[in-house]
Image (cartoon, helix red, strand yellow):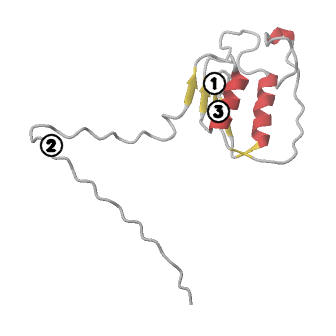
C-alpha cells in the first residue's frame, strides 16, 4: 500500500544582528486609521466630479467633495444630472452611502460593492445654463 507523502517545510531562523548598546532601535509606526487616511478629499467643487466618483468606486476609497458651486446664486450645489449620476452609482452597487449637506455644496460618498445584473437608468441632460460642457446628456 502506498502511503501519502507529506512534506515538511522548515524555516531557517535568522540570527539577530547585534547592535551597539548606544544605538536605539528604530521607532515603530502606529497603524494609520483605515477610513480617514484613505479618504479622497477634494475642495475643487464639481470639477471632474463624475471621474472622481468613478475612481472612488473602483478603488473603494471614500470621497469628500467640498465647495460645489457655493457662490452660484441661482443654482448652488449639485445639479440634477449630478444627483442622477449618484443615483445610478447607488443602483449599480450594494452598500453605497451618499450624504449631501442641506445646501448641496458638500458631498460625502462611501462606495459599496459593484453588483452584476441588468439595470436601467434615465439620465437628464444638463442644460447650457449649468455650464457643464456641451450638454451631451452624460450622467
Judge from the rendering whether residue 109 lies leftward or rightward of residue 79; answer left or right: left
Residue 128 disc label: none
Q: Where on the picture, by quarter, is residue 100? A: top right
Residue beneath the point at 41% across and 66% down: 9
Rate crowding at label 2 as few (under 14), some (14 to 19) or many (20 or more) other CA atoms within 10 Å: few
Tell me the residue that label 2 is attached to.
Answer: 19
Judge from the rendering whether residue 94 lies leftward or rightward of residue 122; answer left or right: left
Give the mark, 3 or 2, whose residue is nearer the N terminus. 2
Looking at this view, is 49 or 108 the one in front? 49
Looking at this view, is 90 or 38 the one in front? 38
Cβ–Cβ under 8 Å for marks 1 and 3: no
Q: Is residue 82 above or below residue 26?
A: above
Q: Cα distance, mark 3 to mark 2?
A: 45 Å
Residue 134 point in image, percent of width and height: 85, 11
Tell me the residue that label 3 is attached to.
Answer: 56
Q: Where does the C terminus fall, quadrant-wise?
A: top right
Q: Where on the picture, by quarter, is residue 56? A: top right
Give the mark, 1 or 3, whose residue is nearer the N terminus. 3
Tell me the residue that label 1 is attached to.
Answer: 106
Give the mark, 2 or 1, whose residue is nearer the N terminus. 2
Q: Cα distance, mark 1 to mark 3?
A: 16 Å
SS at mark 3? helix
SS at mark 2? loop
Q: Cα distance, mark 2 to mark 1?
A: 53 Å
Residue 86 point in image, percent of width and height: 75, 32
SS at mark 1? loop
Amino acid at each position: 500500500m502506498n502511503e501519502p507523502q507529506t512534506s515538511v517545510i522548515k524555516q531557517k531562523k535568522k540570527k539577530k544582528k547585534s547592535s551597539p548598546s548606544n544605538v536605539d532601535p528604530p521607532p515603530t509606526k502606529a497603524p494609520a486609521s483605515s477610513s480617514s487616511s484613505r479618504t479622497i478629499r477634494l475642495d475643487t467643487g464639481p470639477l471632474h466630479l463624475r471621474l472622481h466618483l468613478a475612481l472612488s468606486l473602483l478603488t473603494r476609497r471614500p470621497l469628500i467633495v467640498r465647495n460645489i458651486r457655493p457662490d452660484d446664486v441661482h443654482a448652488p450645489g449639485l445639479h440634477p444630472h449630478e444627483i442622477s449620476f449618484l443615483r445610478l452609482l447607488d443602483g449599480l452597487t450594494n452598500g453605497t452611502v451618499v450624504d449631501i449637506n442641506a445646501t448641496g455644496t458638500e458631498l460625502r460618498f462611501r462606495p459599496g460593492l459593484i453588483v452584476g445584473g441588468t439595470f436601467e437608468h434615465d439620465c437628464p441632460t444638463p442644460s447650457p445654463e449649468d455650464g457643464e460642457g456641451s450638454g451631451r446628456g452624460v450622467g
